[in-house]
Image: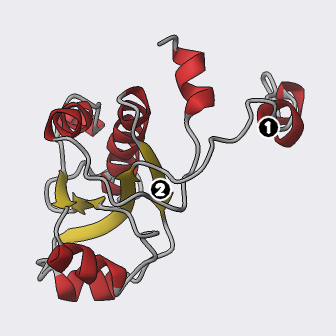
Amino acid sequence: MEFYDLLRKRYSARKYLPKKVELSKLAHILEAARIAPTAKNLQPFKVIVCDNEESLGKLSKAANIYGAPMALLVCGDIEKAWHRDYDGKVSQDIDTAIITTHMMLEATNQGINSVWVCNFKPDVIRSEFSLPDNIVPEHILVVGYAVGEAPKLERFKEKRKKLEEIVSYNHL
């Protein structure tokens, strides 16, 4: 699949069939996370695959997972992440966003739908999954086979700003 075709094919699916994601496809999705770049290649992340009733139930206490048969809980490790000297900025949120993006795009490449869930209760996830203090729940990537048809590709012409509205050269 051409890169821009892949980007345009991806959309946020919010209703899923109960059909399980094949392990071979999941392996490709997880490999996309493994090879993703991180600050100084420190790889300060953990991915928790939630694919059974118990773990999905735990996630559902903290977020809407849209009835999907699988969700990937992406966590950052603040002890292993790079820290910027100048202001102490910790990279785990950026690193985990990069790996989540890689997984989301590879899911699309594998014919799997997804939605990136940012609206969740981190304290509930921390408690439900018994996360240690250094592990921060950063993102949830819900994955599965969507119900219904994909949105039309024209949405990019209709709903996206023009390039000149979002890009400037050499000044804001």
Q: What number is the disc on residue 116?
A: 2
Q: Measuring from the top left, give residue 165's x and y in whole percent.
A: 88, 34
In the shown orientation, is residue 115 left or right of residue 165? left
Q: Measuring from the top left, give residue 94's x and y in whole percent.
A: 40, 49
Real-space Cα distance between discs 1 and 2?
19 Å
Please name the residue shown 41% across and 48% down the image. 145
Q: How is the image coloured?
A: secondary structure
Q: Secondary structure at mark 1?
A: helix
**The quarter of the displayed image where residue 39 is located:** top left
Vertical order, 9 against 46 (above or below): above
Q: What number is the disc on residue 155?
A: 1
Vertical order, 117 against 167 (above or below): below
Q: What amino acid is found at the position of numbered circle 1 in the picture?
A: Arg
Q: Is residue 152 visible?
A: yes
Please name the residue shown 33% across and 50% down the image. 96
Q: Secondary structure at mark 2?
A: strand
Q: What amino acid is found at the position of numbered circle 2 in the picture?
A: Trp
Mark 1 Cα-neighbour bin, 10 Å: few <14, some 14–19, many ≥20: few
Quarter in which the C terminus is drawn: top right
Of residues 41 and 49, the one nearer the viewer is: 49
Task: Say which label, 1 or 2, has the lower sequence index.
Answer: 2
